[in-house]
Every structure is written in structure tokens, then in C-alpha cells.
Image (tube, grey):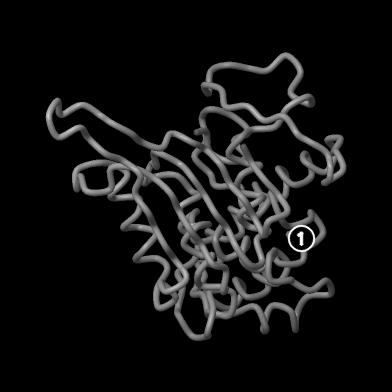
Amino acid sequence: MVKAGDLSPETDLDFTIADVLSPTLIQEVRRYLREQHEASERVRTNRAELNDALENQLGQRQAEALWIGLSANDAAEEVPAGKSYVEYDFLIDTGAALTVLDKQLVAAQYREQRPTQPADEVNLVVTIPDEVSLLNDEAVSHTAGRVRELVLGAEETVRLANPYFDPEESILNDLASLPKRGVDTRILTRETSDPDRQLARSLNKIYHLSGDRRDRLEVRDLYERDEQTGFQRLATHAKIVIVDDSHYYV
């Protein structure tokens, strides 16, 4: 699965912020951090303090995306200080954050110019190698980006079936944030008992990042071998995301 929002094969930058925040809101956050940067290279802040300084308020989803994006790009560290992830304090490297937001702003402006489809329509998505270019990239979206949009927009439940996970994928941070903000999260996967697999490392990462809200995270394994032959007898290979029983990726 390609990283969400990749604008070129050469960058590993996480584009969660550009996926969710408008260019105007990114500019306001950047202006606030620029003012803070003049006084200190590191600042501790939270959603409430940011909203006091912003003309346009950060909603839960926008704040979630901002914290995830800054953290994923090594520009912020979480300081658990509230009941949910969105209420945490964050220690921000203001210089690094400004660099990240500059790139996020360019990406958000680019996305805003592209034609969009109504939310109630079916959208075609695709996963392609980095070196391949689409002839008509307006006809389809990147799979990873649309899946992350679904997850970030969840308010009550996320049910996800996926046989494999990559511990380096940014969506693991998105999934780990769900229990923190009160979203019941259920994952169906396979062969979780093998400690050397990427899957086990990925699930452990989600578990640890979920913090004290792990009671809202449930993982189940659907895999069985034939005792006589040793061959696989049954297993899940489905890739499905169901968000709030209203939005789906199949």
C-alpha cells in the first residue's frame, strides 16, 4: 500500500494534515507556530490553546489529523494530559513543524483544486508502484489516502479486515488514535501468533499507541492449518473497512 498523499516517489512525508485541514486552517496554524518560534524552539500546546489563537476552530477530526501529522513527521511528541488523544498536550519543535506545514500547505492547495465527487457516490481507488504514473489521475484516487480519510472521519466504530500490515505505514498511527478518541475498533486479520511477522509488530504498535483506551480495541485471528497435512485450511484474505456503518472500502 502506498503512503497516503504521496506527491512524488522521492518523499516519505506523511500528508495526513493536507488530507484533512483546509489551506486556510493550515496557514492559521502555521502563523501561530511562527509567532511561538520567535520566542522558543519548542512549545507545549493543545487543541484548546490553539483554538483560542485561531480564527477558524480545529474540530476533533482536524485536531486529530494535525497531531498525527506533526508526530508522524517528527515535529511533535505527545504528552498525555486528557481523557482522549485529541485533548493531549503536544511538545512541538516549532522549526520542524513550520517546515512540515509549508509542504502540507502546498499539498492541500493542490488537493483543493482537484475535482471531487459527492460523498454518497462510489469512488474508484487504486494502488500502484511509485514509479508508475496514471494517465488520468483524476479518475481514481490512491487507496491509502481514501482509506485514511475514512478512518480519520470515524466517530463511533471502525471494523477493518486486512490480512497483512506494514509496521512502517502511517495508517497504524491513525488506527491507534481511534480507541483514544472513543471509537470502538475491531480488526480481523490472520496468523497473529508468529512473533517474527510484520503483522505481529504492526499490531503491537497499534496496541501500545492506543494507551489506556485499549478496551476499545479488539483483534481477532482467522487462520487454521490442517493438523494432518500442515497446509492452510482456512484464512481471511479480505480487505474491508466499515466506518460508522455508513462509509465503506471494499
Q: Quadrant of residue 237?
A: top left
Q: Quadrant of residue 97?
A: bottom right
Q: Nearer the viewer, residue 83 or 40?
A: 83
Q: Quadrant of the C terminus?
A: top right
**Residue 43 appears in view:** no
As drawn, 125 above or below 99: above
Q: Residue at x 45, y 53 (%)?
A: 187
Residue 72: percent from left, percent from top: 48, 55
Residue 21: percent from left, percent from top: 73, 57
Which residue is at the far top?
135
| Residue bearing the label numbered 1 | 27
Q: Residue at x 58, y 16 (%)?
A: 132
Asked if residue 96 lies left or right of residue 17, the reply is: left
Residue 30: percent from left, percent from top: 69, 63
In the structure shown, which secondary structural element does the residue marked by tag 1 occupy?
Answer: helix
Instruction: Identify the amino acid type marked 1.
Output: Gln
Q: Nearer the viewer, residue 39 or 47?
A: 47
